[in-house]
Image: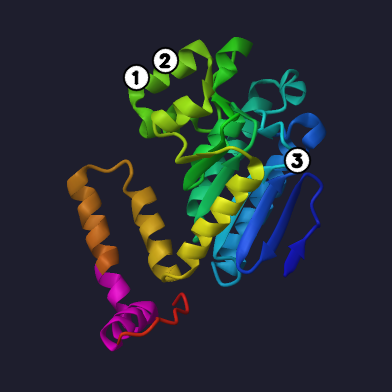
Amino acid sequence: MYITNNYETITFEVKESIGYLTINREKKLNALNSTVLSELKTLLGHLIEEDDGQTVKGIIFTGAGEKAFIAGADIAQMRDMNVDQAKDFGSLGQEVTLLFEALPMPVIACVNGFALGGGTEMAMASDFIYAVESAVFGQPEVKLGLIPGFGGTQRLAKLVGRNRAKEIIYTGRNVSADEAYRIGLATQLFKTKDEMIAAAEKTMGQILKVSPNAVKLSKKVMNEANDLAVADGLRHELEQFAAVFGSEDMKEGTAAFVEKRKPEFTGK
């Protein structure tokens, strides 16, 4: 077990190749301020540049306590920002979401309680979302005279459709866990946080049995081709499909299949 505890507002623990990332501001409902975002940027950058999936094969992302995953951005900090400061803050939040997508390993957002504003935006930057039945999503920025700034206007439309996303964002209304599941925002629902984390661990266990390199490239292709026309996306897929034939994991996986044994993947 490896524990990283050099952070003020987040915790990160690695156990059996799974990284447990928690926003640790329970008294503030895990709201995102500049410190949280900066620490997330540092951690995610380390995982991309230095670890590259060698130690951490998957991440379970949640918030401390039972009340909130991330209740939103820290309004107390935002209220006195000028235009330039707001641009820097929004840029930092967007950079963190892009780093989540650039991670070489999958991320499951486990949403407990409120995931509003920046909370929904951070969850959407994960690979998929598990949620408890009492979870609440939403982009309520318009109620404060704001608009989503960490990707909500872009990712929500891709996940649930443009017109539905417009209705959610324009009204600023809450989205229940049941609705989030029905419209494709949440992948699975659970009665309790413990059940949700256990299910995420089970899913990660299944992922850990397959080729880390193949998972990494699948994530890369799906994210990078998301905004491309189908024909362009297919060309991108074909390039990576061909390239993977030069990997050790491909050689091991196909050999193991032919030899009727379990593969021993190295992620290379």
Q: Residues within 10 Å of mark 3 (few under 14, many from 20)?
A: few
Question: Is the residue 32 above or below the residue 9 in the image?
Answer: above
Residue under label 1, please give it.
Answer: 163
Callouts 2 and 1 close, C-beta under 8 Å: yes
Residue 172, numbered label: none
- The disc, 1 or 3, on the residue closer to the chain's N-terminal end is 3
Q: Amino acid at mark 2?
A: Glu
Q: Residue at x 60, y 29 (%)?
A: 134
Callouts 3 and 2 close, C-beta under 8 Å: no
Q: Residues within 10 Å of mark 2 (few under 14, many from 20)?
A: few
Quadrant containing the N terminus is: bottom right
Q: Is residue 113 magenta?
A: no
Occupied quadrant, residue 3: bottom right
Front-most of residues 132 and 212: 132
Query: Which residues are the magenta region?
Result: 242-259
Mark 3 element type: helix
Q: Amino acid at mark 3?
A: Thr
For the residues labelled 2 and 1, the Cα–Cα distance comes to 6 Å
Residue under label 3, please give it.
Answer: 35
